[in-house]
Image (tube, rainbow, N blue to C red):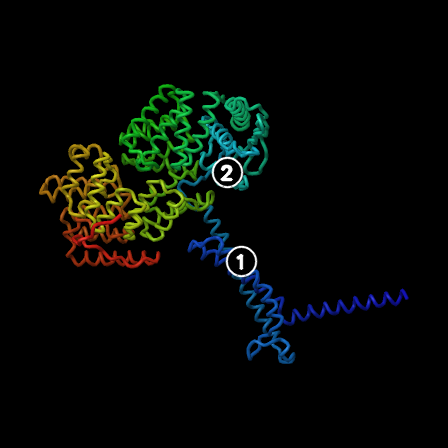
């Protein structure tokens, strides 16, 4: 009986094995395995192509997920189809309807083998290309890219807040920043900038990758945990290349005096850290009341965001700090900075008239320096304020002093670069920016200013390489978008530029610098309605002028005069708008009201400081309309002198446009037309420049008409990319209806 059962079991196993074997052979015969392999390879290739295309059209992330889901769901259906159906010379038939003797599945299988091999070759090609591109990205020739790794280098990452309530982030950030500032005082230690070090907050990026991206040999990371009246701080010093811990310590303290706790920990960690790396010790000293310091840390954290709401909160916190301790120098310096940032100055974020904010800010700075003449932050803010008043040499001296005291202060370096640029010291300004982006590549203002500097001299490869490096760290954030927009604007790709600026504007709507660049791209598209919505006041004047709304141009001018909001850096745009609506006398009157005389303007706002066409062309035209030919000629000669100094910008459409304007005002029509053509070739877009009255003497020339038609075609080409209708130009003399808000 038992033997019979065993035999039956063995027989069942044999039947099952034969059945499985038959199923396997049938799957092979029907090419199900071949189809499966081919489908997987084809799906991979489809996803690679989709990824490239979807990135190019900036499709949302969910679109790629839909592709993946569809391909995954299609897999079992394809297998079932290959099992149930067969490809025959008469077409697709159900497998059971095909005579085995007439089946061509072996031939189909050979074709599938060939197709699969071809797709595998394609896969290999894609992998090789990707690896090559990755290598190229890493090896991209960025002028500011790090080339040598120093063992005496470190990044201080933002300490993590592990408190149950999650309410100690300000303390964690403050501790990290204090450590960074302490380490920055060591002359032979390279310290990564705050912005880039803090860019990894909340990420799980590998420390080796962080070390590579920031070009540092060591990383200091840690955490803060508060429970009741106790606080625990953990700090770790790690070698970036292999993750080896050089130093690790945990500090448990009573939270009776936050500042004392932080001071103690900063001193101990700094001592151990510097002993490990450079053999130097530093001492950190407490400086103020505990409550005041807590508020100061929270205020400083908000100031870093450059968000107007956070700036207002920071301002209130700093007022409370100064109520507690009126003589706390760091708070005075930050109060000066936040006062300025809440103004309507170019590069600021608020709407307080700069004429009101400036004296107040200067008062805070002077008090801070009187109390502590070694405070880097105070010198930095002093330099910023002096630069805004066009006292550039004084600004440079203050900012250089700030950098001596704290070499890691990216704000000071960036402001210094703008002061250098304002005095025509372009190489020095660019050098400072390149130093900043090596140490602090994600610091947006320097990153964007260096991008603009590279595009100014048409070094688009360097600009794009820099942008790629930053994007590896922070992703596609508002600063990266802004950088892409700047590059696209200067290349004449204003449709792409406007898309990038629009996205950046959605993320950072308070930036006046962004509004300035966004306005340039919108002008290139002749999208005046959008300029009115997002543009600066001067761009609104341009938009109104180009649409024939003379009364709106004069309303804005009257507003400037009432508010004493004279805008020297926007005088070119103001002049263009006024001349466009036939109000040349109003331009002259505006200058005389703002400066007392033209001579005073030329002293306070020397044209050589800027790299755009500036205000000389519109002013020269205005004086010529008045009949003052001598003054007009003098202004035109100033234009010539300025252009002669811009030998590094000859490929830039801005300088070629300036050359065209100069030649037209000088009566050299052929030279003006040639310069205009070069400007358009280089990327000049928009009718705003061509509509300038300075070119009125050229309008009947066939060459100018041809250039205008070409420009209109280029504008419409860019508008079509965005789905906009063709542009209908408004003639200068066309009567416009009263504008309705």
- Residue 416, position in %: x, y? 34, 32
Q: Residue furthest right?
A: 1
Where disc 2 sits, the SS reads loop
Where disc 1 sits, the SS reads helix
Closest to the observer, 487 or 372: 372
When asked about the image quadrant of residue 369, the answer is top left
- Residue 122, position in %: x, y? 52, 61
Closest to the observer, 414 or 132: 414
Image-based side of 632 in relation to 292, left or right: left
Image-based side of 271 in relation to 688, left or right: right
**Mark 2 vs mark 1, CA separation in Å:** 30 Å
Q: Count residues near mark 1 (Cα–Cα under 10 Å), then give few for <14, some for 14-19, many for 20+.
A: some
Residue under label 1: 68
Residue depicted at 34% across the width and 24% down the height: 364
Residue under label 2: 201
Disc with the residue nearer the chain's start (2 vs 1) = 1
| Residue 643 in sight in this render | no
When asked about the image quadrant of residue 102, the answer is bottom right
């Amino acid at each position: 009986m038992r033997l019979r059962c065993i035999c039956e079991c063995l027989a069942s196993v044999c039947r099952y094995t034969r059945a499985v074997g038959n199923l396997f052979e049938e799957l092979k015969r029907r090419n199900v395995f071949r189809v499966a392999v081919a489908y997987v390879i084809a799906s991979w290739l489809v996803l690679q192509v989709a990824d490239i295309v979807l990135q190019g059209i900036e499709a949302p992330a969910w679109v790629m997920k839909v592709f993946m889901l569809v391909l995954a769901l299609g897999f079992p259906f394809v297998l079932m189809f290959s099992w149930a159906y067969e490809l025959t010379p008469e077409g697709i038939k159900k497998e059971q309807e095909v005579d085995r003797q007439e089946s061509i599945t072996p031939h189909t299988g050979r074709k599938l083998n060939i197709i699969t091999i071809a797709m595998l070759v394609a896969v290999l090609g894609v992998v090789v290309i990707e690896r090559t591109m990755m290598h190229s990205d890493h090896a991209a020739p960025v002028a500011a890219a790090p080339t040598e790794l120093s063992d005496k280098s470190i990044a201080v990452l933002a300490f993590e807040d592990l408190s149950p309530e999650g309410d100690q982030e300000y303390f964690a950030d403050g501790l990290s920043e204090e450590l960074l500032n302490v380490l920055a005082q060591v002359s032979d230690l390279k310290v990564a900038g705050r912005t880039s070090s803090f860019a990894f907050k909340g990420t799980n990026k590998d420390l080796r990758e962080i070390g590579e991206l920031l070009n540092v040999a060591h990383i200091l990371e840690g955490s803060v945990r508060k429970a009741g009246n106790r606080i625990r701080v953990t700090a770790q010093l790690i070698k970036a290349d292999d993750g080896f811990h050089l130093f690790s310590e945990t500090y448990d303290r009573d939270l009776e005096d936050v500042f004392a706790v932080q001071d103690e920990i900063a001193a101990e960690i700094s001592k151990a850290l510097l002993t490990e790396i450079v053999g130097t010790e530093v001492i950190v000293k407490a400086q103020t009341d505990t409550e005041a310091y807590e508020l100061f840390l929270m205020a400083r954290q908000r100031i870093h965001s450059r968000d107007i709401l956070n700036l207002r909160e920071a301002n209130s916190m700093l007022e409370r700090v100064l109520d507690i301790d009126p003589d706390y120098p760091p708070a005075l310096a930050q109060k000066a900075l936040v006062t300025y940032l809440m103004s309507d100055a170019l590069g600021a974020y608020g709407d307080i008239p700069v004429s009101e904010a400036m004296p107040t800010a200067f008062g805070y700075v002077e008090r801070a320096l009187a109390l502590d003449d070694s405070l880097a932050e105070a010198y930095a803010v002093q330099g910023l304020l002096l630069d805004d008043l066009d006292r550039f040499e004084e600004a440079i001296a203050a900012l250089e002093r700030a950098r001596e005291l704290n070499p890691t202060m990216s704000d000071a370096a960036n402001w210094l670069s703008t002061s250098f640029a304002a005095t025509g010291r372009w190489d020095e300004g660019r050098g400072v920016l390149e130093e900043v982006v090596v140490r602090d590549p994600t610091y947006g203002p320097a990153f964007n200013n260096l991008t603009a500097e590279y595009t100014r001299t048409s070094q688009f490869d360097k600009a794009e390489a820099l942008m790629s490096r930053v994007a590896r760290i922070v992703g596609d954030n508002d600063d990266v978008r802004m950088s892409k927009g700047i590059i696209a604007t200067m290349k004449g790709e204003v449709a792409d530029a406007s898309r990038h600026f629009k996205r950046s504007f959605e993320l950072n709507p308070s930036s006046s610098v962004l509004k300035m660049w966004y306005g340039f791209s919108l002008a290139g598209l002749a999208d005046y309605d959008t300029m009115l919505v997002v543009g600066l006041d001067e761009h609104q004047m341009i938009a109104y002028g180009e649409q024939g709304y003379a009364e709106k141009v004069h309303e804005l001018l009257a507003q400037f005069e009432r508010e004493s909001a004279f805008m020297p850096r926007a005088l070119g745009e103001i002049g263009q708008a006024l001349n466009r609506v036939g109000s040349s006398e109003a331009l002259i009157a505006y200058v005389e009201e703002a400066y007392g005389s033209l001579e005073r303007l030329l002293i306070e706002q020397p044209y050589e400081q800027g790299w755009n066409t500036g205000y000389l062309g519109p002013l020269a035209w205005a004086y010529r309309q008045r009949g003052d030919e001598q003054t007009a000629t003098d202004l035109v000669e100033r234009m010539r002198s300025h252009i002669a100094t811009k030998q590094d910008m000859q490929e830039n459409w801005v300088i070629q446009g300036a050359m065209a304007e100069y030649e037209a005002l000088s009566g050299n029509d052929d030279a003006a037309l040639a310069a205009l053509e070069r400007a358009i070739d280089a990327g000049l877009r928009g009718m705003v420049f061509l509509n300038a009255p300075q070119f009125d003497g050229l309008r009947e020339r066939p060459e100018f008409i041809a250039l205008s038609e070409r420009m209109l075609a280029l504008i419409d080409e860019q508008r079509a990319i965005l789905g906009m209708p063709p542009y209908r130009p408004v003639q200068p003399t066309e009567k416009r209806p009263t504008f309705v808000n």
